[in-house]
Amino acid sequence: VLHTTRQLHTTQQSLAPVPPLPEKGGEVRHGLIPEEFFQFLYPKTGVTGPYMLGTGLLLYLLSKEIYVINHETVAAVCILTVLVYGIKKFGADVAAFADKLNEEKVTTALAMKNEAIQALQTAIEEEKKEQWRVEGRSYLFDAKRNNIAMLLETNYRERLLTVYNEVKKRLDYQVAMQNLKRQKEQDYMIQWVEKNVVQSITPQQQKESIAKCILDLKALSKSAHAAV
Amino acid sequence: GPLSERPLMEVRLGELHTWISTCTFSPQGLLGAVQKAWSSYCAKYIHVRRGGPAGISMLLAGYCLLSYGWNYQHFSKTSLEPPI
């Protein structure tokens, strides 16, 4: 059961960004005693107060045998000497090495972050370009519309031409038919007339015409003789 | 601020017993106090960028003192043996 009247996020808590680590830790003197102790005693006892306190405490512990000196004391002293010597000599190098490791980790993380930011920025620019391209949609559609209109026009004109050609062909056919018919009629008529004429020339007419031609020729030859 | 909610370092010596009377001595309260103390110690001396030997050395010194205190009976008994 979910109580819908309860508010879910009541505080402004957020886990990121994490605040960075402090640069240096709390001040510690001689590696063992925090600085706050010295500051705590400074107003009353000055600078040497804590040291006097330490010396007095040490002498009291030794004299009352609250701290007994046995073989473990010697071992502790030797260990402490070696430790202090080691830290003093190799401390800086170890610190530099650790810092270098940290630096590498930080640089890789930073590089990844920068790469991610870069990728997102290029994505943003691409998106903006796409949005700009969208504005040109109307021009694209106008061009397409023009193309289609052109195609339709071309098609229409082609068909018009086809129609014209077909009609012309049919009309030419009719004209050619008429011409042919008239020509055939003409030829046939001429032939018929010639045949009839040839048939009408009887043999008697032929003789007469030949005799007339001979008479004519004689007359002509006489006139020609006379002329010469 | 109010006395009951101040951390220990800001309580004056005269108000110490009143401050002790205000804190809860239940298991959860004690556990919470221990956890708070440990996390504040870590944040101050260990989780820093350029720490030194101070953070761990104080823990080791505290451990030495604690173990000496626990074994004091044993130390004091062996010190009373007669020398050879």
Image (cartoon, coloured by chain):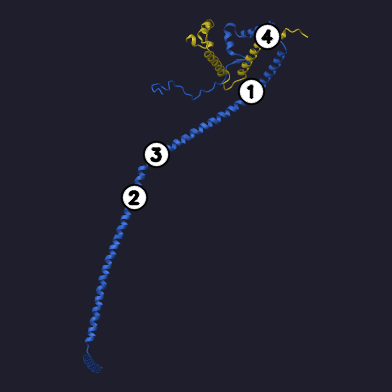
Chain colours: A blue, B yellow
Q: Nearer the viewer, mark 4 or mark 3?
A: 4
The kind of secondary structure element at disc 1 is helix
Q: CA distance from mark 3 to mark 1?
A: 58 Å
Labels 2, 3: one chain? yes
Instruction: Specify the label residue A148 is tagged with.
Output: 2
Instruction: Specify the label residue B73 is tagged with.
Output: 4
Say which residue appears at 41% left-offset and 39% top-offset.
A130
Q: Quadrant of the C terminus of chain B?
A: top right
Q: Position of residue B73 (x, y in %)?
A: 68, 9
Q: In which image quadrant can residue A22 be found?
A: top right
The kind of secondary structure element at disc 3 is helix
Residue A35's place in the image compared with A125, above or below, is above
Q: Residues within 10 Å of mark 1 (few under 14, many from 20)?
A: few
**Chain of residue at mark 1:** A
Q: Position of residue A186 (x, y in %)?
A: 24, 76
Q: Nearer the viewer, mark 2 or mark 3?
A: 2
Q: Nearer the viewer, mark 4 or mark 2?
A: 4
Say which residue appears at 61% left-offset and 26% top-offset.
A98
Instruction: Specify the label residue A132 is tagged with.
Output: 3
